[in-house]
Amino acid sequence: MNSLFHPHSATPHGNGMTSQRARDRLVATLREEGIRDPRVLDVIRTTPRHLFIDEALAPRAYENVALPIGLGQTISQPWVVARMTELLIEGTLPRRVLEIGTGSGYQAAVLAALVDTVYTVERIEELLRLARRRFRSLKIENIRSRHDDGNVGWQAEAPFDAIMLTAAGESVPRALHAQLAEGGVLVAPLGPAGAQRLVRMRRTGDDWQREEFEAVSFVPLLAGLR
Ligand code: SAH
């Protein structure tokens, strides 16, 4: 029998674990776990997460888990990426977004599919190099990236309509407050290791409205470059 036409043969979408079916299953899981925004679910469905991790881990790319990306860092769990994105774009879709902690580049790629321009800052040069290569090969052209300590933000491009931190600190660095536009929204994991929560802050003049959401577990926001 000609295996090319066998109904169970591999499809052009890739092998079983990186296939469209695996992505659809992930989206179904995210929906069950409370992700509601159809824009976010659509982007998760179409973003090839397996290309943001080491090939050896690709079979696990569409499981709802964080995975190691080397240098002691992780690509966030898909549910966390979806939830933070949903919190960031609820209400008004921001045009210019600053992300602190590029890591694999997956969260930046998800944001880039939704907003005009993503500015992302990473302190580990090697991770940034790999992420940039992924953006290029996926022809994502609306991500600007910078090797720097994200604690200082990206002054030359400020203000931003929205800011997302993907590494956890006890509080939001001063500089980032100052780089958020009037009416802007900031989403971050905040709190000590073992007791972090997703927090959303909205700025109205000098007034900050703060909301707390689910418990999460992120790598720490560190200082300095490497
Ligand atoms: N958004 C990433 C998640 C990466 S994990 C993704 O989608 O894969 C958090 C990242 O934050 C790590 O790569 C870590 O090196 C980076 N990081 C930690 N402290 C930082 C800082 N002060 N400035 C910039 N990046 C930082």
Image: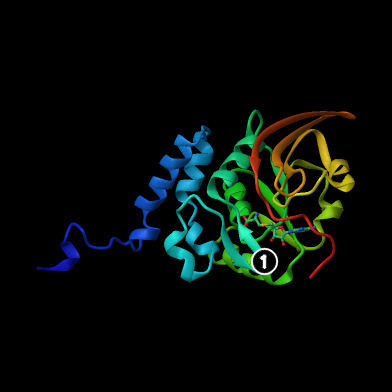
Q: How many marks?
A: 1
Q: Which residue is mark 1?
A: 72
Let me know if residue 138 appears in the view. no
Q: Does 25 sit left or right of 68 as displayed?
A: left
Q: Residue 5, image x and y in percent?
A: 16, 62
Residue 211 shows up from this direction:
yes
- Taking the image as shown, residue 22 lies to the left or right of residue 163, namely left
- Give the quadrant of residue 189: top right
Instruction: Please give left or right for residue 33 compared with residue 22 in the image.
Output: right
Could you say which quadrant of the image residue 79 lies in?
top right
Q: Is residue 40 above or below residue 155?
A: above
Q: Position of residue 147 (x, y in %)?
A: 77, 65
Q: Residues within 10 Å of mark 1 (few under 14, many from 20)?
A: few
- Report x, y in % for residue 88: 66, 37
- Residue closer to the observer: 123 or 118: 123
Residue type, numbered disc 1 = Gly
Image quadrant occupied by the N terminus: bottom left
Q: Is residue 58 above or below residue 187?
A: below
| Residue at the image position 63 percent from the left and 43 percent from the top | 115
Taking the image in four quarters, ligand 1 sits in the one at bottom right
Q: Residue at x 50, y 57 (%)?
A: 49
Q: Nearer the viewer, residue 8 or 169?
A: 169
Give the residue drawn at x 71%, y 32%: 212
Q: How is the protein colored in the picture?
A: rainbow
Element under disc 1: loop
* Distance from mark 1 CB to nearest ligand 1 atom below 8 Å: no
Residue 214: image x %, image y %? 64, 36
Relative side of 182 to 14, left or right = right
Residue located 70% across and 39% down the image: 197
